[in-house]
Image (cartoon, rainbow, N blue to C red):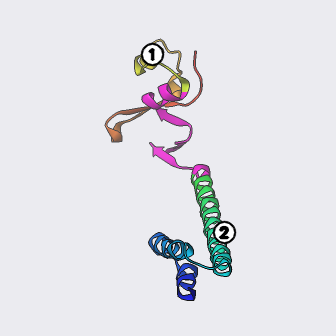
Amino acid sequence: MEKLLNQLRKATGLEDYESASKACLDYYANATEEERSEIKKVMIAKGDEILLKARESRQKAAELIAEYENSQVNIEINGQKYPLSEWVTLKEYCRRFGLKNTMVINNWISRQIIPQENILNISQLNDLRLIKAVPYK
């Protein structure tokens, strides 16, 4: 039994843990009350350890995502820098602001509802058109 418990304690990966816990549970069926109590303690301790590692991993992931979202990514066109967090494609603008399709935006551009300073035509990217991500109407 000690060998089984040591395998469970030392399990590092998911496969190790699953095989060790299965072996402990198989042994559990024929174990004495004292052995069952010991198996429960070790399994609960290992479960708590796994949960702690999961919480730490989630926290690290949340910090990395927040850092990425807060980083300023700029595009430089003709010597002027534009933060990409403020500029979107026509398709992305439709998604963000709930418009039916990009023809609505093209119509706004032709009718000058969207001011010229809020439109970027990037010739280096095959004439990609970006607009400033603010509500128009």
| 84 in the magenta segment | yes
User: Please, what secondary structure does the residue beneath circle 2 have?
Assistant: helix
- What stretch of residues is rendered in magenta? 69-96
Instruction: Kindly identify the amino acid type of the residue bearing the numbered disc 1.
Output: Val
In the rendered image, residue 71, in percent from the top left (x then y), is placed at 59, 53
In the rendered image, residue 115, in percent from the top left (x then y), is placed at 53, 21
Instruction: Kindly identify the amino acid type of the residue bearing the numbered disc 2.
Output: Asp
Mark 2 vs 1, N-terminal side: 2
Crowding at label 1, few (<14), some or many (≥20) Cα neighbours within 10 Å?
A: few
> 7 and 50: which one is in front?
7
Above or below for 66 versus 45: above
Above or below for 17 versus 110: below
User: What residue lies at 56% left-to-right and 74% top-to-bottom?
Assistant: 28
| 91 in the magenta segment | yes
For the residues carrying marks 2 and 1, which lies nearer the camera in this image?
2
Residue contact at pointers 2 and 1, CB within 8 angstroms: no
Of all residues, the one furthest to the top in this rendering is: 111
Report whether 36 appears left or right of 83.
right
User: What residue lies at 47% left-to-right and 31% top-to-bottom?
Assistant: 92
Residue 48, label in figure: 2
* Number of numbered tags placed on the structure image: 2
In the rendered image, residue 121, in percent from the top left (x then y), is placed at 41, 32
Pointer 1: what residue?
Answer: 104
**Hey, which quadrant is residue 106 in on the image?**
top left
In the rendered image, residue 126, in percent from the top left (x then y), is placed at 31, 37
User: Please, what secondary structure does the residue beneath circle 1 have?
Assistant: helix
- The quadrant of the image that shows the C terminus is top right
Crowding at label 2, few (<14), some or many (≥20) Cα neighbours within 10 Å?
A: few
Report whether 106 appears left or right of 17.
left
> 56 and 69: which one is in front?
56
